[in-house]
Image (cartoon, coloured by chain):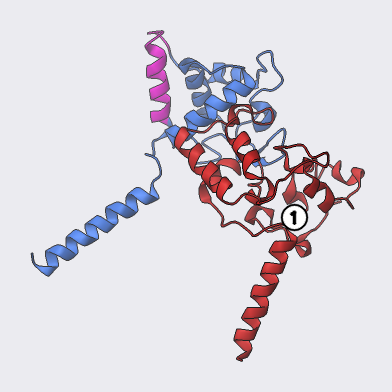
Chain colours: A blue, B red
């Protein structure tokens, strides 16, 4: 094998190793994340369409327990929040205020699963997740 | 001996003395631990609890001091290994000698903070004893040197 070919192969290999090390999860757009929750919701309710208005009500509701999403994230998702127990600063949830939000599906699913258990007392349905996601996409 | 070598020796000695004063050697920072645990609170130094307490804590993340802090199996196990590996080598018990998962309940913590009055803990700028970074300005980087303490009003 010529030294040029082997050098090219070596570089390609290094680039792919680096790329896989740098991107921990496949990045997606907020719209893609919304679509996958909507698709899941439609498998149960074929006419489902995500609603930002419904998502906003859900976000501010305590669901019969102690906390709402707003307890930590404030009523305005574009504002900086604060963890209600520890006081730690939480960066804004609205995509318009924080471009990192809703770009990593695994991260979104991890937090929404945990936080639904804390706030609602159970896991949220795909429809509820889609409503909150579109609310965060539309919030300014 | 060169002056620079001498200075380096002194610096190394100071670091080891201050690590000892903090109750153990400082663990290397772990990005996964910082990210997953540091989202809600200071990524507390692993040496502040013993291995048994970390195990209890890391196997009950779904009920984590009133919050659900569940992790996927792989992340959970990898963070627990880091904590176990860098845990306190001595037991971290309450003053009554009971095991605890709350760093602020350990006899060590209470002894280290015995000069801090009850009213100070309740200041809005501090809020609670687990808010290390309110006074320890380098807490997020795992540094708790006495010279970096600034108690807010």
Q: Residue furthest bottom?
A: B1
Which stretch is magenta?
Answer: A31-48
Q: Residue at x 60, y 30 (%)?
A: B60
Q: Does residue B152 appear in this view?
A: no
| Disc 1 packing (10 Å; few <14; some 14–19; many ≥20) | some
Q: Is residue B102 left or right of residue A40?
A: right
Q: Is residue B151 left or right of residue B85?
A: right
Figure quadrant of the N terminus of chain B: bottom right
Pick the residue in front: B84 or A27: B84
Q: Left or right: where does residue B125 sit relative to residue A73?
A: right
Q: Is residue B144 magenta?
A: no
Q: In the displayed image of the protein, which residue is found farthest to the left?
A: A1
Q: Position of residue A139 (x, y in %)?
A: 56, 30
Q: Which residue is mark 1?
A: B136
Q: Residue at x 59, y 21 (%)?
A: A117
Residue B94 can be seen, yes or no: yes
Assign a secondary structure to mark 1: loop
């Amino acid at each position: 094998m010529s030294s040029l070919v082997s050098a090219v192969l070596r570089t390609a290999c290094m680039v792919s190793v680096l790329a896989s090390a740098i991107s921990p999860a496949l990045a997606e757009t907020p719209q893609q994340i919304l679509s996958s929750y909507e698709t899941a919701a439609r498998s149960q309710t074929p006419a489902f369409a995500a609603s930002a208005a419904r998502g906003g009500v859900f976000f501010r509701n305590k669901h019969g327990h102690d906390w709402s999403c707003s307890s930590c994230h404030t009523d305005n998702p574009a504002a900086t929040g604060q963890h209600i127990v520890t006081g730690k600063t939480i960066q804004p949830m609205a995509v318009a205020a924080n471009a990192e939000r809703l770009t990593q599906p695994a991260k979104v699913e991890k937090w929404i699963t945990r936080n639904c258990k804390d706030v609602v007392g159970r896991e949220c349905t795909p429809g509820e997740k889609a409503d909150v996601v579109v609310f965060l996409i539309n919030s300014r | 001996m060169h002056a620079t070598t001498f200075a380096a020796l002194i610096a190394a000695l100071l670091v080891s003395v201050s690590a000892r004063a903090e109750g153990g050697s400082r663990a290397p920072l772990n990005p996964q631990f910082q990210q997953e645990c540091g989202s809600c609170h200071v990524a507390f130094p692993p040496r502040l609890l013993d291995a048994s307490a970390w195990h209890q804590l890391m196997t009950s993340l779904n009920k984590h001091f009133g919050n659900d802090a569940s992790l996927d199996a792989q992340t959970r196990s990898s963070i627990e290994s880091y904590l176990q590996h860098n845990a306190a080598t001595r037991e971290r018990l309450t003053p009554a000698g009971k095991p605890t998962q709350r760093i602020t309940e350990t006899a060590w913590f209470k002894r280290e903070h015995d000069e801090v009055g009850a009213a100070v803990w309740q200041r809005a700028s501090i809020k609670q004893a687990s808010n290390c970074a309110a006074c320890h300005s380098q807490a997020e980087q795992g540094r708790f040197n006495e010279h970096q303490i600034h108690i807010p009003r």
